[in-house]
Each structure stands twice: as structure tokens, then as C-alpha cells.
Image: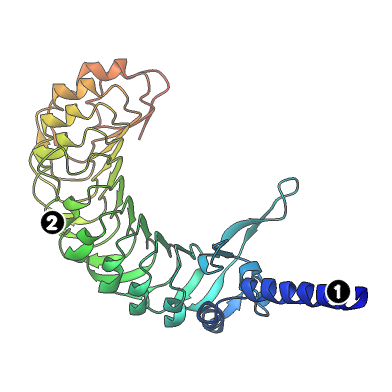
Amino acid sequence: MASHQFICFLAMISLMIINISANNACHPDDLKGLNDFKAGIHSDTSGRLSKWIGQDCCNWPGISCNSTTYRVVQIYLPGHYVSGDDESPNFVSSTMSGSISPSISLLTSLQVIDLNKLVGLTGQIPESIGVLKDLKELNLQTNQISSTIPESVFTLTSLTTLNLENNHLTGEISENICNLQALQKLFLSNNSFTGKIPLSITKLHSISTIHLEKNQLVGEIQLPLTPSQWPSIKTLSLDNNALTGVIPDSIGYLTTLSSLSISNNQLTGSIPSSLGNIKQLQMLKVNNNNLSVETLPTTMCGLTELSVLYVSQNKIHGPLPGCLSSFKYLLDVDVPFKRTATLPMGVQKQ
């Protein structure tokens, strides 16, 4: 009797081990998607992909899984990362060469794809990426991704961060960007985007950061027409394009803005007095345009948080406001030669 009970006990333990092993095994779709991704990479100086062996993908380097479903939720393989433990961290810089397999769409529970600064990723963003409806972060910055942004990206309504800067992307920025209502951070700088800034970008009500600098964008600056459209905006960077027209007076609605950079464009007109409404502004760059004003608006005397002010290479005829001398945080200034107000000690003039 005791022998029979012992055999039953062993059978139960064996069954439990089998079940645990089965539960921890990679979902077949995730396993194929990851193996196809690995097959598309022909060089990995970090050696992380060489450790993608077997069925337990949740323990592979760079892969994280849901603790309940064991579906893959994150691919985190940045070019710069930390290995080792907290006591002896090792800072690693690596590259990967290859392209992103369309089979990445098989990982339907993905929330994060972070392949930033791998330098050598080429080809296009797969159109199939649009099926990843749980995706919150897509970070492919500093690679060699080319072609246009597929329209399917603009169906990823859970996205909070879209970072595609420092690639070779072309074409126009789609008006469908307004579908990304959860989007908080948009980085598209240093590509070759053309056309106008889409008006629909003003409908991104959760946005806090917009970087569109160093492209070939034309037309006028598009800004919200009511204060409620960008209630959390902190950074707006549009410099080094070919933007024309005036700085919209509605800039004054962006009262949460801390950084505004619109230098190196072809903007005309004056600096609107409404700029003085942005009391939290710390960096203002409007240099290298065709702005024509007698002097800076006196409302700017309320921008006491400014630490960076670039206004040179415009047509500013009169002296700068004397209030600049009381700006205690102002450290970096680029103003017209011979028109410099008395500035705080320690200021670096460009």
C-alpha cells in the first residue's frame, strides 16, 4: 500500500514538473517571431542573440514576458546598455546589422520594442507591425531605417512613445498621426521628412514632447488654437527645417512649455508678445530666421526662468530689454552684436 502511494506521489510530482515546464515554454508564435528576428540580424557585436537558444524565450537576453500568460511583452536590445549586477555594472556599447523581420507581428502581446542606437539596422519598418495593438513604445532611433513610416504605425493607438530619430526616413508625416491619442513623446528628428507639418498633430492631446528638427519640412508652424489641445506640452523643437510664415500668436497658449526651438528656418514677422505667457520657458531659440522687430517684446521680461536665449541672425533693430540683467538663471545667450543688454555675471555669449 505504501509502495503504491509512493509511486502515485512520484507520478504527481512528475506531472507538476511537466506542467511547469509547459507553462514556462515560449508561445509557438512568440518563438517563431523571435527566431525570425534573430535570422534577420547577421551581425551582433554584443553576443546577446547567440544566447537565444532553446524554447524558454522568457529567459533570453533582452526578452521580458508576462508573468501570468508567459507571452513576450518586451524586446529590449539597445545599443548602449548595462550588464552585470548593481555592485559591478558593466557599460556596454554594441551594434547590430540586419533588418527587422515582418514576423515580429507574431508577438501579439508586445508592449515595448526598443532597438535604439544599434546603428546598423536597415530596411523598412514592417507594415505588419500594425497588428501589435498593445504596443506602447517603439524606439528605433539611431539606425539606418529607410523609406516612409508605414500607415499601420498610425493605428497603434496604445503608443505613448514613438522614437524614430536619426534614421533615413522620407516622405510626409501622415495626417493620421492624430489617431495616436495616447502619444506623449514624438521623436522624428534628423531624417528626411518633407511636406508640411500635419495640422492633425494639434489633436494629440496627451503630447508632452515633439522633436521634428533637422528635416526638410516646409510651410507654416502648426499650433493648437485653444489652450486645451496641448495641456502638457514641455518641448517643441522644429529647428533646421524650411518653415515659413510667422510665429503664431497662439504660441502663448502653450503655458506648460519649457523648451522652444525654431531656429534655422525662414520665419518672418515679429516675435509675438504672447510668448510672455509661457512663464515656465527655460530655453528659447529663434536665431537664424528672417524675423524683423524693433526689439524683443517687453512681455518677455516675465520669462524669468530662461537659461538659454538665442535670437541673433534676425533683424532686431533696437536694444534688448534691460530686464535681461535680472534673469538669474540665464547662462547661455546668442544675441545681436552691439545690442547686448547688461547681462548677469557668468553668462556665456555665443
Figure quadrant of the C terminus: top left
Figure quadrant of the N terminus: bottom right
Which mark identifies residue 5?
1
Q: Nearer the viewer, residue 270 or 202?
A: 202
Q: Amino acid type of disc 1? A: Gln
Of label 2 and label 1, which has the lower sequence position? 1
From the image, tell me which residue sits under label 2: 199
Query: Which element is circle 1 on?
Result: helix
Asked whether the viewer can see residue 100, the reply is no
Instruction: Using a 10 Å C-alpha cutoff, classify the residue at mark 2 as few (fewer than 14 neighbours), some (14 to 19) or many (20 or more).
Output: some
Distance CA(mark 2)–CA(mark 1) = 74 Å
Q: Amino acid type of disc 2? A: Leu
User: Residue 203: horizontal and vertical position, in percent?
Assistant: 17, 52
Query: Which element is circle 2 on?
Result: helix
User: What residue lies at 39% left-to-right and 25% top-to-bottom?
Assistant: 347
User: Residue 320: horizontal and vertical position, in percent?
Assistant: 20, 23
